[in-house]
Amino acid sequence: MQRDEIFENLKIAIVEGDGIMARETSEQAVEADVDPLEAIEKGLAKGMEIVGDRFECGEAYLPELMMAGDAFKAAMEVLRPELLRQKKETTTAGTVVLASVKGDLHSIGKNILANVLETHGFSVVDVGVDNGALAIIQEAQKSNADVIGLSALMTTTMPAQREVIEALKELGLRDQYRVVVGGGPVTQEWADEIGADGFGENAIQAVELLKGLVA
Amino acid sequence: MIDFLDVCERAETGPLMTERDFELKVLIPGLRGVVKEYDIQYDKETPVPADNDLADRVYEASLDYLARVGIYCQDTNRVIKFTEQEIRDVVARAPGECFTGEGKDASVFRVRQPDDGTAARCHVNWGTVHSSWEMAIDIMSANVAHPEAKGISISAVNKTVRGRQITAGSPLEMYAGIRAIRTAREALRRAGRPGLPMMNLVPAAASAVTTIGASGPQFGARTTDGWIIGIISENKLDYGAMNKVAYLLNWGANIGSQGAPSLGGYCGGPAGTSVVNTAYFLLGLIGMKADYHLCFPIHFRHGCCSTRDVLWVVSTSSQAGSRNVPIPVIWLGYMAAGVNTKMYFYEAAAYLLAACTSGADAVKMPTPAKGVKIDASTPMEARFGIEMVKAASRLDREEANELVIKLLEMYETRIPEAPQGDRYQDCYDPETATPSDGYLRLYDEVKNELSAVGIPFE
């Protein structure tokens, strides 16, 4: 198989959300001695870009994002050992820890954002729902995050976003992370009031915000 | 027939899997499969279809979907499964009505049909947050003064209790939950309607402990009120929700399952969202022993229910449910625009036309400003909603479709930048609880415009 054909098939596998095809094509890439970084950049990343663009213009939804992300991971299981062997490193747009704050069990908005960020090259650590401030901060430290994203869908859970920022200050860690907030009742005014670094009304806005913050 | 203890048992014995596997390997392929097999296709040119065959296919797809996918229990990581026959048995034995309220405000909440010719049941007020208890009482009292109001969603508490910030799951949430019920009952008494059912108990309670603790009769709650228990999007429950069901079943109180499928989320596009929304009527009956259901399919990006594709979901799933699932459903719409804006009324008119002519059993008056702006509701929205419900009863689906298309042209492109509008105190005199001259003028102008479009107001 030609290199260009491998790149094209990797891209198609991502767009179709086909994990089996992504894995098999990655194996073919390794056998054909294709540079794994090139396979990622010219194949997988291109596919993720297409899915991200489709999502932004309303032609794709969360299932397509999730399946693309899953196919990407399947391919990376093959390509990552090859990267290590060749002592090459991938770059990410930044590492983001995402959490629904204490008391908040809503996850769908956060999950959409996690998947959209991945299609834009961010590394995402999703710590789930109902997280206390310390647990979120510990996860940010562990993953060496650039950004902490806090979701709250109820007016009674919004104060927990402030708690995370206050806890960062108490621990002397506020300068180490950008903190962004979102969720149904959250506004720019609230973000300003609690000293957050940014607010995203929806996933698309949040991606642009994070690109600016991490740049 | 399946009882709730069977559901609890299956939550501990069903197939074990991670939540991610449930989403990727069960839910998404299961939904995609039925959408294809039953040929459910979104038609953007027809936001309110008059197609009984489509409605019945959506129903059959939803039943098949629920049987294939089940409900994921987040506490046990197991899938609660039901067979198709078990679901059909529950549907066959569902009463199709729910007894609500007391005294002269007692009423039977019944199912309707598409093109019914009767007015949908009106539920007034919203769970929106107000900045003072006095304001909440004034607005609730004014809203229930409409004789057409058969139920109320009581206002959520403001953000503090005696100056202390309420946080989810804390003891202060318990104080706030109790006070919300007591305050609402006082508002109903002041308005001369003490028996009117409160159908959204307990608003703003994040925890089962608050819901259960605040629900004692000593605080004003009655079995003839209604308790909303949310399905976690999508197709998930947790022990918090199931504990609420267990408590209410033992007390004999009305249970309202709540589904809010997100168009663009796990459901994918409009076809999948319609199937999931309909499946939630069934899930309410079989998995939560619900007496009624409350739903608001919502757009994942815009956070409102007035987009063209969501209106199609509202119409098709309402038709599917009304024709096939005997559970009374309250339809709740979040509008993008806020109070004292023309756009709010255009959106509300479109939403109510789509829902009512498609067989919605009850409608909650559409919520301004996506329900997230504090103090962003007034009694004028209920007045408009009731007039619209009556107008919709004079129309059928085909007529509604033509009107909804015209209305969409009046607001559709402005949804991303919708005006957030006023707060109550900006356009009402809080002393006399009367609207400002400016709001009254805008209201009259809007009604004239909508009459010119063809909406048959009285």
Image (cartoon, grey):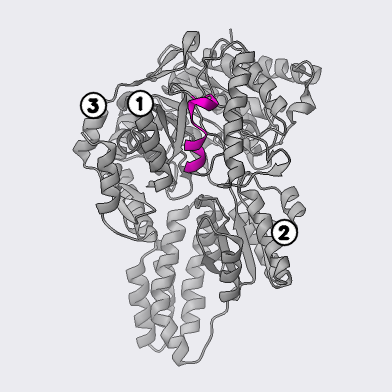
Q: Residues within 10 Å of mark 1 (few under 14, many from 20)?
A: many
Q: Residues within 10 Å of mark 2 (few under 14, many from 20)?
A: many
Q: CA distance from mark 3 to mark 1?
A: 11 Å
Q: Amino acid at mark 1?
A: Ile
**Magenta residue span:** B208-221
Tag 1 residue: B327
Left or right of residue B288: residue B259: right
Q: Chain of mark 3?
A: B
Instruction: Work out whether residue B88 can be spotted.
Output: yes
Horizontal and vertical percent position of residue B126: 59, 28
Tag 3 residue: B92
Q: Chain of mark 1?
A: B
Horizontal and vertical percent position of residue A58: 52, 50
Q: Chain of mark 2?
A: A
Residue visible at 44% across and 29% down in the picture: B315
Q: CA distance from mark 2 to mark 1?
A: 45 Å
Query: Is B293 in the magenta?
Result: no
